[in-house]
Amino acid sequence: MSPSAIDNTLEGKRPPLLQDFKGVVATPSDRHNYKIKRWADNAVRQAACVVFPVNTEDISLAIRFARAEGLSLAISGGRHNCSGSSSSEGGLVIDMRKMSVVRVDTERKVGYIQGGTTTHHAVIELFKHGVAIPVGFCGSVGVIGLAAGGGVGFSTGLHGLACDNIVSATMVLANGDIVHVNESEKEDLLWGIKGGGSNFGVIAELGMRLHEPRADVYHLMHIYLPDRLPALVAELNAWMKVRTPEESLLFNFVLSPQNGKPILILTGVGLFGIEEGERLWGRFERLGPIINKSAQTPYDKIATFADAACERLGTKINIGAPFNNFDYETVQRSYDLWLRATVKAPHSVILYEFLDYTQMSKVPMDATACPWRTMDKIAMIGIMGFTDEAEAMKLSEELRTCISSSSTESTRESIGYPNYSHALGADNETDANARKAFGSNYTQLQQLKRKYDPEMVFNKWYCVRPADV
């Protein structure tokens, strides 16, 4: 249905299926409430209708209405997906931003996170109670998309993936039914949302295991000139042999916002005090950064370290590049290719992540829907500020191939961390990428899809095809 047709349908009064909807229903003619802006400009789609639920019953009504009117559905949480997976051209978007309540059950040590909660909001609210959940580095990312898609971050070394910490959920299925998911109810769905993303319904609220964090962390922040690249690669390789689970480092190629020249940024989170941080990471200071802003930082600021880069406006494409080897020759080629890419896409970055995956690898491959537990290392490629999307996609693929080129064949052919490869997740003409993303767990996910969403109502992110009857 076209946006204008929906406008006419909703003109004057709501249709019967939305009469009891407590939140906001907006069409393009409603300039105040109609919100389709996304983190990436190229992810914006002209929805026929955007609804803003305030409770789980609203979500159910929205799904039933969309299906009755033949509207394609999209779920919008943190709105960070670059491929348009949280948007729907001519369809209906369930925008969860009005559902962002965070509750804490101190006795059971479970945090309840509503579907529109961002990482930073969750960290702040939980920290008021002296507790935390595993999150990533960017505060504006939605917790639900992060966790249901796997979820890596600075505490992965201690607590594993975010999805491994999911203990329950309240969901709305494709038929509008509201279900409670835990180890004794719908336990098959609990398995499916631990890495299976949005394939089975709208997650109105997640229950996640809580941890007791430090009051503060050590934040490493070094900026180097490009001539330090060989020394940094050598030192990072030496550090990886002795690092602890409390240490997470990110190594970036960016253009300086001050003068537009290339710089190397080494940033990290250490779940320890400043003395330990200086002892463990003093090796990097001896390499001569031109800027050193390392400091002890309050824990509730921890999810904002990447916000400066994440808040840049404009066009964006993200893709992940799994790799085994961090050798200088490959890194230098990647740097050279990235530098050429900045001519057409000046805000582009390469971010090499060095996280400890020991804890996540201890979980059996079939214990959750998430199968990429043998992943070694991952880089995130962000092509940003482009005008030609097809050219930008080509650049991202060239960089991905380059970064993974010295790795094993299985690593080169894998998707790696699905949450980083937005474009691959949105390419659902076939299920080739979903099969790659879910690997040996794909067959079981197909059974769940047949049971809970046989008509593929939820089809925006690595869409699983239902098993044949």
Image (cartoon, rainbow, N blue to C red):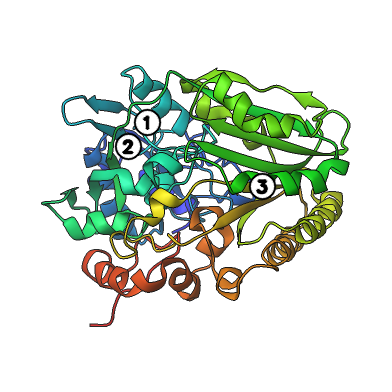
Question: Which amino acid type is marked by label 2?
Answer: Pro
Query: Residue sitting at 24 percent across and 40 percent down?
Result: 56
| Left or right of 269, for residue 373 | left
Is there CB contact under 8 Å for labels 1 and 3? Answer: no
Residue pointed to by mark 1: 98
Task: Please tell me whether mark 2 sits on a helix, a strand or a loop.
Answer: loop
Asked if residue 151 lies left or right of residue 452, the reply is: right
Vertical order, 173 against 78 (above or below): below
What percent of the width, then of the height, locates residue 428? Answer: 49, 69
Of mark 2 and mark 1, the one earlier in the sequence is: 2
Residue at image location 60% in from the left, 75% down from the top: 409
Numbered circle sitting on residue 78:
none
Where does label 2 land, which residue?
A: 53
Task: Quadrant for residue 121, please give it.
Answer: top left
Judging by the rendered image, the residue that carries numbered circle 3 is 238
> What is the quadrant of the N terminus in the image?
bottom left
- In this view, the mark in front (1 or 3): 3
Q: Amino acid at mark 1?
A: Lys
Toward the viewer: 185 or 27?
A: 185
Task: Give the Cα separation between the discs numbered 1 and 3.
Answer: 47 Å
Query: Is 406 on the left-hand or right-hand side of 432?
Result: right
Mark 1 lies on a secondary structure that is loop
Mark 3: few/some/many CA within 10 Å (<14, 14-19, 20+): few
Secondary-structure class at tag 3: helix
Viewer-proximal residue among 102 and 220? 220
Looking at the image, can residue 83 be seen?
no
- Amino acid carrying mark 3 in the image: Ala
Residue 443 at x, y = what percent? 32, 75
Residue at x 81%, y 55% (from the top left corner):
332
- Disc 1 packing (10 Å; few <14; some 14–19; many ≥20): some
The reply to whether callout 2 and callout 1 are in contact (CB within 8 Å) is yes
List x then y, in percent, for residue 14: 30, 41
